[in-house]
């Protein structure tokens, strides 16, 4: 990406092993993320550009001398963050706060919208999949790299548990996966906030019980009405704008919780007084999806959840620029890339 709206496919030098803990991956599937749309809307023009993409399924092409758990030919999920797998945060299951954390396709790190890339700390970062390369579950497995784990993190942050009422702010891939996660954790009522008919329909198939298409204060009132008059026990904020965050905090019932996973586009967090006076917990951050893969994987393998349905378009590398356009114009929910 060379600037807002300026995505180009370029030839770059082949990825090579640098550290003995590295692996080289050949990407078989990647995707465009809703968070890629923020720089697509606002990035300042750049001569060098930023290599993009932070979600992938890939084949291990080569490993460094100190890589212990992976070998050439393994099929892996690449979560969006690098983690060493050994520091105290990795041991606590918070790999996105790893002592060596870095985010693919960000700040000069290489990205996965590519044929190949280098993975630092391969043992800690990558997760080996127990399926073959052509498995029909591939779209759903690809969501383990980010959107499913991120939706799950929102649900965990929002303290979703059996019998609770849940509201989901955002009908992108993460919000839709948040619906899956809330249902999986036993929520009794799941209110999806959105107005795009295709996305609403998918949310309902994923387990949403109610739809709120109003906006602003009307939306807040509608959610409160639906959720017993006081608001939802748990709110998943899956957008990251000030207005969506304010709405999320406003629709939580007293003592409720908001799990934020939308990348905040502002330094200040709105809704401070609303949260304070109603004892609403606000938590969240970059999801440690590496930690969640093991728990979510059986539900995909055994067909209980189908998060891969968020992909409604597949492109080759040459059509990645058009994929960005389609997602930015909300013509597509999420685009899969097959290099
Ligand atoms: Zn670590």
Image: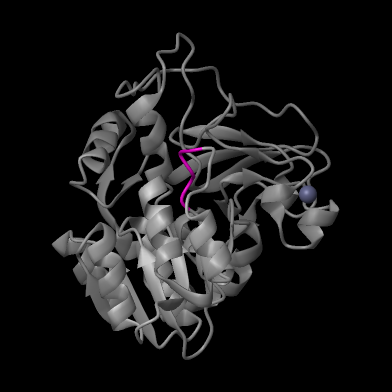
Residue at (49% x, 44% y) in the render: 264
Whether residue 130 is visible here, answered yes or no, is: no
Residue 256 lies left or right of residue 171; in this view the side is right
Magenta stretch in the rendered image: 262-266
Whether residue 187 is visible here, answered yes or no, is: yes
Residue 267: x percent and y percent?
54, 37
* Between 191 and 106, the one nearer to me in the picture: 191
* Between 191 and 252, the one nearer to me in the picture: 252
* Between 45 and 270, the one nearer to me in the picture: 270
Question: The C terminus lies in which quarter of the figure?
Answer: top left
Q: Is residue 236 above or below residue 256?
A: above
Residue 81 lies left or right of residue 169; in this view the side is right
Q: Is residue 80 above or below residue 180?
A: above
Residue at (19% x, 70% y) in the render: 201
Residue 168: x percent and y percent?
38, 67
Residue at (35% x, 82% y) in the render: 227
Q: Is residue 189 above or below residue 80?
A: below
Number of numbered markers: 0
Question: The N terminus lies in which quarter of the figure?
Answer: top left
- For residue 263: magenta? yes
Residue 44: x percent and y percent?
41, 17
Secondary structure mainly formed by the magenta segment: loop
- For residue 41: magenta? no
- Residue that protrudes farthest toward the bottom in the picture: 163
Residue 214 lies left or right of residue 236; in this view the side is left
């Amino acid at each position: 990406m060379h600037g807002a709206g300026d995505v180009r496919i370029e030839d770059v030098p082949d990825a090579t092993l640098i550290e003995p803990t590295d692996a080289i991956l050949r990407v078989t599937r990647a995707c465009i993320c809703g968070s890629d749309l923020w720089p697509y809307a606002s990035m300042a023009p750049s001569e060098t550009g930023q290599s993009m993409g932070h979600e992938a399924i890939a084949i291990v092409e080569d490993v460094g001398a100190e890589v212990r758990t992976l070998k050439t030919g393994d099929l892996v999920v690449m979560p969006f963050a690098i983690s060493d797998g050994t520091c105290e945060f990795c041991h606590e299951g918070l790999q996105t706060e790893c002592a060596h954390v870095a985010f693919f396709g960000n700040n000069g790190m290489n990205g996965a919208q590519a044929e190949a890339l280098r993975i630092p700390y391969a043992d800690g970062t990558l997760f080996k999949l127990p399926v073959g390369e052509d498995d029909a579950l591939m779209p759903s497995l690809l969501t383990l790299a980010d959107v499913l784990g991120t939706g799950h993190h929102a649900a965990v942050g929002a303290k979703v548990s059996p019998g609770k009422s849940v509201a989901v702010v955002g009908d992108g891939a993460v919000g839709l996966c948040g619906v899956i996660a809330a249902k999986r954790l036993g929520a009794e009522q799941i209110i999806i906030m959105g107005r795009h008919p295709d996305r609403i329909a998918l949310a309902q198939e994923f387990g949403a019980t109610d739809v709120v298409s109003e906006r602003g204060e009307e939306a807040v009132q509608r959610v409160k009405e639906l959720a017993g008059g006081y608001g939802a026990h748990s709110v998943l904020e899956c957008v990251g704008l000030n207005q969506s965050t304010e709405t999320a905090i406003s629709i939580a019932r007293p003592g409720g919780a908001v799990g934020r996973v939308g990348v905040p586009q502002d330094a200040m967090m709105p809704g401070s007084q609303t949260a304070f006076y109603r004892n609403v917990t606000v938590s969240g951050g970059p999801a440690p999806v590496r930690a969640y893969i093991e728990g979510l994987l059986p539900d995909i393998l055994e067909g209980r959840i189908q998060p891969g349905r968020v992909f409604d378009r597949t492109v080759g590398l040459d059509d990645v620029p058009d994929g960005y356009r389609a997602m930015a114009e909300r013509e597509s929910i999420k685009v899969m890339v097959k290099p």
